[in-house]
Image (tube, rainbow, N blue to C red):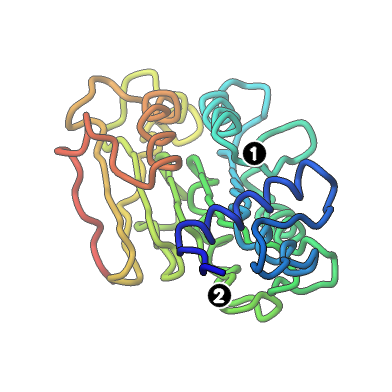
C-alpha cells in the first residue's frame, strides 16, 4: 500500500476538520491505511487554528458623556467592531470615564479571565489587547497598560498590549505621556497650539489642553508621534479624535502607520 504524500496528509486533515464542524464531531476517515484522528486530537487542532480574541478598551476625556467632547472617540471605538474587535463597554458606552481607571482595568481583567478563576493564564483562550485613550483618558489608559504589565495574577506571556492609540493625551500635572514597556505598538496624535474657541479653553483659564509628548519606556516599542498642527489647520483639543479616526482605525487594524500621514511621524523619545 502506497504511503500518502505530505500534501495528501494535509488535505486529509483539513477535510476531517471541516467534516467535524459539519457533522458535530463525528470521526471521519480519509484513506485506507491512514490513521484515524480522534475527537480529542481534532479538538486540539481546532483550538490551535482559532484566532485569538481581539479586545479593545477605550477611555474618554474628562467630560460629561453627553457633551459631545468624546463623540469622535466613541465612533472610533465602535468602528473597530466591523473588523472583529470586541469593545469592552462601560454599560451602554464604548469607553470608560476618565476618572474610572480602576473600573476600566477591572473590566479588562474580567474579559481576559475567561473562565473566571481569578487568573489570566493558559486556561483562558488567547486574547490580544488594544487600548485607546483621549485627553485625560489618554494618560489613564497608559496607567491601565502598566497595571497589566505588573499584575501577578496575569501570566507573563499574557501581559502585553498589542497596540495603543493616544488622542491628545493630557493631564495638567504631567509633562509627558509614558508608554509602558509591555506595549508593542503606539501611535500618538496631538495638537500643540491652542485654537481659538477650543473646547478646553473654558476649563483651563484660556490656555487649552495641548497633548503631551510621548516617551517610550522600551526601545522595543514601535512608537510614533504626530503633531497634527504641523500638517492640519486649526485642530482643537476636542477635534483630535474625529480628525485622527481614519488613521487610528488603520493603526489598530493593521498595526502599521497610516500611509498618507506617515511622513509626518516622529519617533517617540526613549526613556
Residue 157: mark in rendering: 2
The image quarter in which residue 196 lies: top left
Position of residue 168 relative to residue 9, above or below, is: above
Query: As drawn, is 27 to the left or to the right of 60?
Result: right
Residue 73 in picture, x, y percent from top left: 53, 31
Residue 49: where, in percent of width, then height? 60, 56
Quadrant of the image containing the C terminus: bottom left
**Residue at figure coordinates x 77%, y 67% from the top left:** 38
Label 2: how many Cα within 10 Å (few below 14, some 14–19, many 20+): few
Structural crowding at the residue carrying mark 1, measured as other residues with C-alpha within 10 Å and reported as few (<14), some (14–19) or many (≥20)? many
Instruction: Give me the residue at 51% from left, 33% from top.
Output: 203
Task: Return the x and y of residue 21 as percentages of the image width and height.
Answer: 75, 46
State which mark lies toward you, 1 or 2.
2
Q: Could you say which is closer to the camera, residue 167 or residue 26? A: 26
Residue sticking out furthest to the front: 1
Residue at 44% x, 42% y: name it.
252
Measure the C-alpha gap from mark 1 to mark 2.
26 Å
Q: Where on the picture, by quarter, is residue 269?
A: bottom left
What element does badge 2 sit on?
Answer: helix
Determine the secondary structure under disc 1.
Answer: loop
The residue tagged 1 is 95
Quarter of the image holding residue 123? bottom right
Amino acid at each position: 500500500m502506497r504511503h500518502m504524500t505530505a500534501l495528501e496528509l494535509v488535505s486529509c486533515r483539513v477535510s476531517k476538520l471541516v467534516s467535524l464542524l459539519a457533522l458535530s464531531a463525528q470521526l471521519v476517515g480519509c484513506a485506507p491505511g491512514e490513521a484515524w484522528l480522534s475527537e480529542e486530537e481534532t479538538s486540539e487542532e481546532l483550538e490551535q487554528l482559532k484566532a485569538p480574541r481581539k479586545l479593545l478598551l477605550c477611555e474618554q476625556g474628562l467630560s460629561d458623556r453627553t457633551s459631545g467632547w468624546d463623540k469622535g472617540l466613541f465612533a472610533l471605538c465602535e468602528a473597530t467592531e466591523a473588523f472583529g474587535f470586541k469593545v469592552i463597554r462601560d454599560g451602554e458606552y464604548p469607553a470608560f470615564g476618565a476618572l474610572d481607571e480602576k473600573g476600566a482595568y477591572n473590566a479588562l481583567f474580567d474579559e481576559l479571565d475567561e473562565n473566571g478563576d481569578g487568573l489570566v493564564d493558559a486556561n483562558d483562550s488567547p486574547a490580544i489587547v488594544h487600548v485607546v485613550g483621549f485627553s485625560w483618558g489618554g494618560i489613564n489608559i497608559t496607567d491601565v497598560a502598566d497595571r497589566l504589565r505588573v499584575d501577578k495574577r496575569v501570566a507573563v506571556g499574557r501581559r502585553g498590549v498589542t497596540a495603543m492609540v493616544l488622542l491628545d493625551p493630557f493631564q495638567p500635572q504631567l509633562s509627558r505621556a509614558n508608554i509602558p514597556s509591555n506595549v508593542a505598538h503606539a501611535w500618538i496624535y496631538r495638537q500643540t497650539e491652542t485654537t481659538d474657541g477650543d473646547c478646553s479653553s473654558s476649563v483651563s483659564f484660556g490656555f487649552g489642553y495641548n497633548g503631551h509628548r510621548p516617551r517610550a519606556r522600551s526601545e522595543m516599542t514601535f512608537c510614533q508621534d504626530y503633531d497634527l498642527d504641523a500638517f492640519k489647520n486649526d485642530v482643537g483639543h476636542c477635534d483630535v479624535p474625529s480628525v485622527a479616526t481614519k488613521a487610528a482605525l488603520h493603526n489598530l487594524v493593521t498595526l502599521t502607520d497610516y500611509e498618507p500621514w506617515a511622513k509626518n511621524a516622529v519617533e517617540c523619545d526613549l526613556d
